[in-house]
Image (spheres, grey):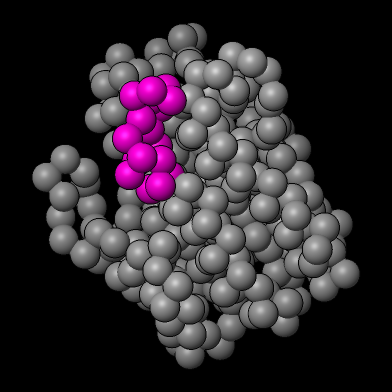
Amino acid sequence: MTTLAGRTMFISGASRGIGLAIALRAARDGANIALVAKTDEPHPALPGTIHTAAAAIDEAGGRALPIVGDIRDDDDVFSAVERTVAEFGGIDICVNNASAINLSGTLDLPMKRYDLMVDVNTRGTFLVTKACLPHLKTSDNGHVLTLSPPINLAAHWLGNHPAYTLSKYGMTLLTLGFAAEFASSGVAANCLWPRTIIATAAIQNLLGGDQAMARARIPEVMADAAHHVLVQEASGYSGRCLIDDEVLAEAGVTDLSPYSSGDRSELQRDIFLD
């Protein structure tokens, strides 16, 4: 495969940022995109809603199915999957993009924030994938792609923000588990993580503002890497923790300067990568 034309993607939390960029890249091929997110109404500090994302997907050449829902809610997720299959006839790709972040240390982290990260990141990945898997198994090239990091047990990562680390590593462990569990079914499951920070609302509002944004790459670097992963033959491309620039190099893209949002000589490495 070299295109996602006619394929159906089910993606969580794609109203903006990396998730929206992945959806738009697939849409340019002519893919069907079911996006599930809570952003029914505009947020004062965050751009875009599920409805503006859907409009952009349609404009890019895809077919969008926006579904307002919470991936922490079992009924919301299973209903969203049923609606997707009813609309498009199946699901070929499951992208676990939705994520909550709080980099507080143990003593400073409220338990409700801990619960949110575990429920959205780890449990949400499990639930969304579980709901999609029966349909991925009937696809001729089923893929699960989770936006989570490689496991790095260095003390400076384990000790900086244990709760967030647990939730993201949980996403990775689940995905590697799916790869092993469903290998005989022909379903691929891989993780993808950026080499550098990515210019998203989270970086702007929570993790450094304009200074950090100038040292970030734009979300399209992850979108293009995700596209390369998702057009691979599932049976031979699974169980990997992938880094965006390495995936693009595999695809023959070595000049990453178009992805820089600011001073390309001062790019900031993302967390979990030494």
Quadrant housing residue 18: top left
The residue positioned 69% from the left and 32% from the top of the image is: 151
Magenta residues (range): 101-117
Quadrant housing residue 169: top right
In the rendered view, does 177 fall on the left or right side of 21? right
Query: Viewer-proximal residue, 171 or 189?
Result: 171
| Screen quadrant of the C terminus | top right
Query: Viewer-proximal residue, 98 or 111?
Result: 111
Queried whether the magenta region covers residue 25, the answer comes back as no
Query: Viewer-proximal residue, 199 or 100?
Result: 100
The residue positioned 21% from the left and 43% from the top of the image is: 46
**Residue 168 place in picture, x, y as percent:** 55, 40
Residue at far left of view = 44
**Residue 41 place in picture, x, y as percent:** 16, 61
Queried whether the magenta region covers residue 112, the answer comes back as yes
Indicate whether 233 appears above or below 90. Answer: above
Query: Viewer-proximal residue, 155 or 136?
Result: 155
Indicate whether 53 appears above or below 169. Answer: below
**Residue 49 place in picture, x, y as percent:** 24, 58
Indicate whether 43 appears above or below 111. Answer: below
The residue positioned 15% from the left and 55% from the top of the image is: 42
In the rendered view, does 133 fall on the left or right side of 21? right
Q: Is residue 173 visible?
A: yes
Q: Is residue 251 visible?
A: no
Q: How many marks?
A: 0
The residue positioned 41% from the left and 40% from the top of the image is: 114
